[in-house]
Image (cartoon, rainbow, N blue to C red):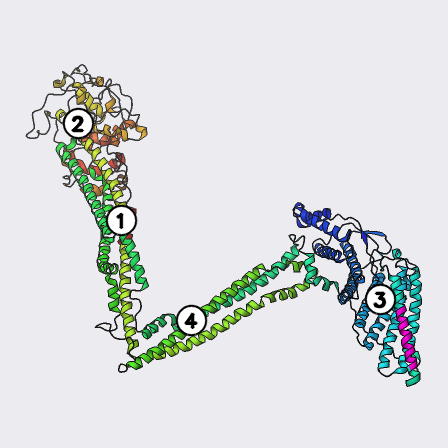
Amino acid sequence: MAHQAPMISIPKKATEEVDWTTPIRNQIAQSYGESPDSYATECATLQRCRQDAVRGAGSDLTARDLLYKYFGQLELLELRFSEIRVNFPWRDAFTQKLITQTSIAYEKASIIFQIASTHSSIASNQNRSDPEGLKRAFHYFRTCAGMLTYINDNFLHAPSTDLGREVIKFLVGIIMAQATEVFFEKITDEKKGNALVARVAAQAAYLYNSLSEEVKEFMGKGIFDRNWVTIIQIKSKYFTSMAQYYKGLADHAAGKHGDSLVRFTLAETAAKEAQRTASTFDSIFVTQMSPTLPPDAGPTIRDLTKAHLALCTDRKAEAQRDNDLIYNAVLPSPDTLPVIEKAVVATAISIQDVYGAPDVQKVIGTDIFIRLIPLSVHESASVYSEEKAKLVRGEVEKAESAEVEVKSALEALGVKEGLNRFKSIAEGGVEEEVPLEVRRWREDIQVMEEREPAESLIGDLNRLKEGVRNELESISRDLEIESKDCEAMRIKYDHLWTQAPSAALTKTLRQDLKSHYGALEAASASDQQVSALWDAVKGDIGLLLSPQVEDVFRESTQAGVGGGGENLLDIDIGSEAKDVEEKNKIGNYVEEIDERLGRLNKISHERGEVLRDLKEKIQSDDVSHLLLLNRRNSAVEPTLFAAELEKFRPYQQRLAATVHHQQLTLQEITTLWKSLKDLAGRGPGAKKWDEREKRKKDTVRRFSRARDGYMEVRDGVAKGLQFYHDLTELSGVLKRNVKDFVSSRTAERETIASSAETQRRLTLPAPSSGPPPLADKPPRPPPPPAPSLDSSFSAMNIGGSGPASPPLPPTNRWNGVTSPAAPQSYSSPQPPRPPSQYQPQPQSQYQPQQPSQFQSQPSYQSQSPAQYRPQPPPVPSQATGSSTFLPPPPPRPSQPSYSTPSAPPQDPYAGLNLFSAQFSSASNQAPTSSYASQPQQQQPSYSSPPPPPPPPSQYGYSQQQPQHQRQPSYPPPPPSQPSYQYQQPSSPFPPPPQQYQQYGGAQQVQQQTPFQGFPPPPSQQPYNQYSQSYGR
């Protein structure tokens, strides 16, 4: 085509600066509760994106891409900030009026108008003489129409004229007419059929005729350029002429010469009108007045119509001549001619199709505010994630079920265990002689034996046991010796011996000793069991650790009793060839089953790989962007989820295929295995194999029992060693306690023995009345000096701390008889003995061990020897008893109180069963603490030594014991009086040995304090419990 018809382009809108940052920051802080500062970069990017799109951009492809990007970001921004309010100032494209709106929809409509304007400009400026330019022009006219149609369909109540429905509709008509015009140019260049060209031209003429009628409504409103109206009118006549011209050519070719001549005439008439209007337009066209038209629009349209008019005139003359000379066809009326059919060749391309193209999505790029996800999108994404999780769980369950199925099938058939057997039968060999589990037992036992041999552990156990036994026997001997020594001294000194018997004091110690012995005996029984078990397994353990264990298994796996020279398979003993053939068959079956098992492993591996790929794909799948785009339409979620889950369909199909192939392989293995068992499961070879396996299993069980017994022995020995270590420690504690007890008792005996010797010398002279003295007694020594008597009786003084003036003698307080005066033989005092002769009483030895409340009590060791200085002799005639010299104790009379009780038991421990629980619980305290604590209970301040005792013939003193206890002013009578059997707590000396049974009385139990020389022995409950568990 020599000339291109000028095309109309839509003018652009103008705008001013817009502040996106502040409203977005406020919306983020209010609606999302996040820090706006973290989105400062995104706000700046959006601001720069708008400036690039609407400020200074041209009408080329670059401007198109910038507008594409900004509109795409606006769409995404509106999904997050639908209620945002920003001032958007835009000028009308036709009236240039500035209109400002705060709705983001106004901004979107304006941007779409800008895109449509850019598309129309790109299409108008294409070189349509080039086929590619022609295609681009046709495409961009259609996309421009789609953009404008989107404005009319989605934005109501336009605030500006350029966005009004009628205006947009008129603009869409212009663009569609021009698109049809471009298509007309394309088919004429391609020399398409005249009928088709006529139909396309008729469509273009129809569109332009409609526009020429519609434009009349806008006349006088100053909206459109007047040159647009002229161009539309010219093209309306032009394409009417074109339609008639090409239809005439078609009729001429069809033999309708009359119709063709009439159409040529109509075409010439319309071309003349178009030519006349174009000539006028060319004369008045000013480029600056119509920037939306090409600069050469006037000359171009003039030349185009002129050339067409000449073509129509020539063709009409030719048709007229031919009809006159040749055809002589009757010319029909123009009104009776058939109407030319129109062909709709141009349709609008929607905005969804434009933005759905990958190139446009690439231009838009990623979402600027991709980090800002609305809560509703999160909820929808969670629903989709659950759908994905269900899919994964279902596939995982199928895969696990398939794995369990193949494992169960193989175990039910016994393929893995039996295949080695048939393989050995086919090869004629044997398996590994020593099983793996036996080798593992051997290694474990070797490691334990290298670290701690069992024999040495048992030796250590026996040594510890003997050590404990010897120590307990030593403790028992020490207690027996101490008890015998105490009783020997008691027999020797008779009633002068005041040390308490050992039986009550050692009761707890003996109980501990007995408990230790019991634990030791129970442990010994367990040791015997361990030793018996070790003797039973020692031989097999030694064999297991020796190199001969391989010979044992080799002998157990021989095919026959006499050796292993025969084959394992003797299907037909008489035919070796048959044996070889049978072995080959078995070998083939084994190879085929092995191949199937390998196939199962490959299937399982492939299933695992596919499952892992599926999990990774699902993990990386994110539909938040799609959900954000479809946020306004909640009903689309199920359809969207189903469409997105289809992405994982190939993985599901691959997993299903693996399950199918696995089932086929299992069926093949089952068939082959049954055939193999039928073939090789009969005959002497299989029987010999079974016998060999049975002997091998018996050998394995033998070593398994030995290994279990060995572990039990080591466990028992370890418990025994721990037990004996604990028992050794406890026995050591008991031994130290016994040693302390024996030492304390020994020191006490020495002190009491010294004091008893002194008392014996004082009481040797016999009185004039009383029983005859004992035979073979040494001669009576001279009477001790008065200080000796004072010091001796001062030890018995439980009230005073030193000698003072004596009180009146006790007159008939008990029996109405005043105590006699001292005999004349004690009138002259003897020289005082050195203070060393007066050793402290045995009770004072345990004074430091008494509780703190008794520490302030003065002891006998702290008294000065000056207290024992001799006093002037008393006058014999004084009956008041004021003399400080005490009469000598009367000789031992024949006391009825000593003869009435029964004879004392020969065994000093015979009366132990008489002791109460209270005495037993207190037996660990010092036996003499009652003597030390008694003075504190009866400690009135005495200023004189005690009065002389009553005569020995007065036995009523024992009957007045309560009265005596209420009168602490008088000391108790001397130890020779029989009444002391009831007054032992108030006297430092115990009763005679004939009164041993008195120790079990209630009065003695209440007044005797436990031994405090050492702590009580530990309890034996842990030994009994441990020994019982160890004994088991």
Residue 249: where, in percent of width, then height?
86, 78
- Separation of marks 1 and 2 at Cα, in angstroms: 51 Å
Residue that numbered label 4 is attached to: 597
User: Which of the numbered marks, if any, corresponds to residue 504?
Assistant: none
- Separation of marks 2 and 3 at Cα, in angstroms: 159 Å
User: Which of the numbered marks, if any, corresponds to residue 721?
Assistant: 1
Q: Give the left or right position of residue 336, taking residue 351 as reference.
A: right
| Of the pair 577 and 321, the residue shown nearer to us | 321
Q: Earlier in the sequence, mark 3 or mark 4?
A: 3
Task: Please name the amino acid that badge 2 sits on.
Answer: Ser
Question: Main structural element of the magenta stretch: helix, strand or loop?
Answer: helix
Residue 546: where, in percent of width, then height?
24, 59
Q: Nearer the viewer, mark 1 or mark 2?
A: 1
Quadrant of the frame with the C terminus: bottom left
Q: Is residue 242 visible?
A: yes
Residue 839: where, in percent of width, then height?
19, 24
User: Which of the numbered marks, if any, corresponds to residue 3?
Assistant: 3
Residue range highlighted in magenta: 306-321
Q: How many marks?
A: 4
Q: Earlier in the sequence, mark 1 or mark 2?
A: 1
